[in-house]
Amino acid sequence: MSTAVSPLAPPDVPEMPVIAGVRLATAAAGIRYKGRTDVLLALLDKGTTVAGVFTKSKCPSAPVEWCRARLKGGNARALVVNSGNANAFTGKTGKASTTLTAQIAAKAVGCSTSDVFLASTGVIGEPLDATKFDGVLAQLTETATPDHWMDAAKAIMTTDTFPKVATATVKLGKAKVTINGMAKGAGMIMPDMATMLSFIFTDAPLSAGVLQSLLKAGVEDTFNALTIDGDTSTSDTLLAFATGAAAANGAPKISRASDPRLKAFTKVFQQILANLSEQVARDGEGARKLVEVVVEGATTKPSARKIAMSIANSPLVKTAIAGEDANWGRVVMAVGKAGEPANRDKLSISFNGIRVAKSGARDPSYNEKEVSEAMKAPKIQIKVALGLGKAKDRVLTCDLTKEYVTINGDYRS
């Protein structure tokens, strides 16, 4: 975990309200380092529904496989998250670790192992000693409180420099419901649904099916439109939990994703996902610039997404941004290699609203001094106009600095 907070960290951290039906507790279990808080337990009241989306990696972690298998049940009573060890590429030992962790949690909470959800983040390839949870989880069930949100967000950090939280309230029917979220992630980030973990909690009475629909649709233009280094983790996990406690205040029970009463909730739910995914981009390992890549005039939205990702994942583009150099030649390269429809002679490129290239060549009004000044801003927008159609898309990323190499060169030491 880095000690210097990212210069892109949000200036204001929201006060995280209580959500009825959720209690949280953290502890130092010694998973990788002594004396560091590294385990989170979220206790969920009976009746809590769950949904999830996970990495598409063909080498998923043991906790990802555990959660996928239990998601069909639709119910949750506990979430256990550890940092320091991803429990990925750990063979039969990893599978046994998830089973033992769930058994320890289920006994402590008083529920079935099928209602326990797990997530791990940290080093890949090292066995996770689940016996370290023994006693710790039982203790956490005693100390869990509804107002432990910031400590919970800090417990799941690895190379993150700041805890990532978001909250909002919205009307469901005539009742007020709350949505809280937390995330971690700074490297090995290109979700395809490091080690990116995110957890959303609400007191809204939503069926598991509705929650799953909301989540699947919500990640498409938020977490799935995010990249830090182009590497899809073995462990990406986004879980959402709905306790249903707001039903006691008159919130209607929602069992269909098409229910019109869900419209306002859906919008706010997506805003929470967008907020958290941007915080992950802002905390990219070694990042000094938040970068938004906008591609417009594409033939289709998937085509625009692929081109935007090609630009956002280019080390040459990212290092140019780090050097505050509006090197549009590297952007042209990234567009051309994407394998999507593009016409060199129709291409226009802008940096922070200043057009530097037009119709396949340098813009006639290009002013080096003006552009250089614009590149000093902490947020950089690269806009590419393809001139082929009406589709557009955008992705978030960050620059690539020397510190990224330092962090990842020393990660296991």
Image (cartoon, rainbow, N blue to C red):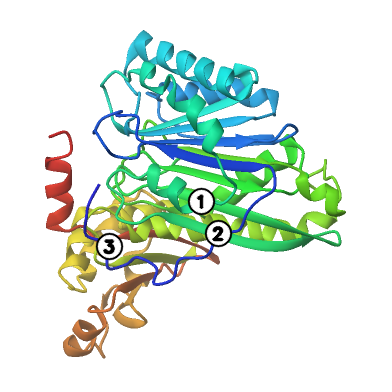
> Do the numbered discs 1 and 2 sit on residues whose CB atoms are within 8 Å?
yes
Label 2: how many Cα within 10 Å (few below 14, some 14–19, many 20+): some
Q: Which label's residue is closer to the chain start, 3 or 2?
A: 3
Q: Which label's residue is closer to the chain start, 1 or 2?
A: 2
Say which amino acid is labelled 2: Met
Where on the picture, by quarter, is residue 408? top left
Picture coordinates of residue 387, whole percent (x, y): 45, 70
Whole-angstrom CA distance, mark 1 to mark 3, is: 21 Å
Label 3: how many Cα within 10 Å (few below 14, some 14–19, many 20+): some
Q: Say the numbered circle drawn on residue 16.
A: 2
Say which amino acid is labelled 1: Trp
Q: Looking at the image, which residue is at 62% across and 62% down?
A: 168
Label 1: how many Cα within 10 Å (few below 14, some 14–19, many 20+): many
Say which amino acid is labelled 3: Ser
Residue placed under numbered mark 1 in the picture: 149
Picture coordinates of residue 96, whole percent (x, y): 42, 11
Q: Quadrant of the C terminus?
A: top left
Whole-angstrom CA distance, mark 1 to mark 2, is: 6 Å
Which element carries disc 1, helix, strand or loop?
helix
Q: Say the numbered circle drawn on residue 401.
A: none
Q: Looking at the image, which residue is at 42% across and 13% down?
A: 95
Q: Which label's residue is closer to the chain start, 1 or 3?
A: 3
Nearest the camera: 164 or 310?
Answer: 164
Q: Looking at the image, which residue is at 32% across and 52% down?
A: 228
Task: Establish if 409 lies above or below 334.
Answer: above
Picture coordinates of residue 53, whole percent (x, y): 55, 36
Nearest the camera: 339 or 224?
Answer: 224
Residue placed under numbered mark 3 in the picture: 6
